Amino acid sequence: MKDIFVQMTELEARAEAMNQDLGLLKQRVVALLEENQRLTQENEQLRGILKFEREQEEQRSSPKSEPLSQVHDEALPQEQPADEPGEGHDNLAKLYYEGFHICNVYYGHLRTEGDCLFCLSFLNK
């Protein structure tokens, strides 16, 4: 009778150890799945940016049949009023809406948890 009790105690201890190991493995799998999801999202966003940049490069490199005087006029910088945001602001806004931080705290990092108050305050300036 004593042997059965000892065996049951040992079996219970092994089951608890296996349960702990299973819990640790489960935590590692969850962490890996979260990282995989984050990397997948970042990869998709980077592919979108790359596609956009390629399209922009193709548009710049395609020959245009405009008169030289018109090309010269377009090459001159256009003055913008001081209170209107410029092209740089537009580029930062585009980056933000593509899912990247533009604030000085996390600049260039992927936004994974929704809107960033630092970025939004920067955009509203």
Image (spheres, helix red, strand yellow):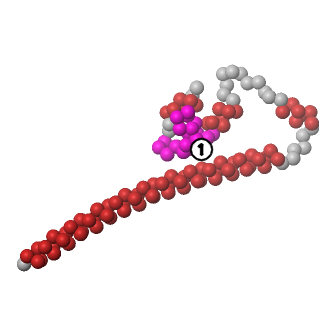
User: Residue sitting at 77 percent across and 47 percent down?
Assistant: 57
Please, what is the three-letter code of the amino acid marked with disc 1?
A: Glu
**Would residue 92 appear left or right of 20 to someone viewing this image?**
right
Q: Position of residue 58 (x, y in %)?
A: 78, 49
Q: Which residue is mark 1?
A: 98
User: Residue sitting at 52 percent across and 34 percent down?
Assistant: 105
Is any atom of residue 102 visible in this view? yes
Front residue of 89/107: it is 107
**Would residue 49 appear left or right of 69 to someone viewing this image?**
left
- Give the magenta range: 94-114
Residue 56 to residue 80: above or below: below
User: Residue sitting at 32 percent across and 64 percent down?
Assistant: 22
Q: Position of residue 96 (x, y in %)?
A: 58, 39
Q: Specify the farthest residue to the left.
A: 1
User: Residue sitting at 55 percent across and 33 percent down?
Assistant: 104
Q: Picture quarter containing residue 88?
A: top right
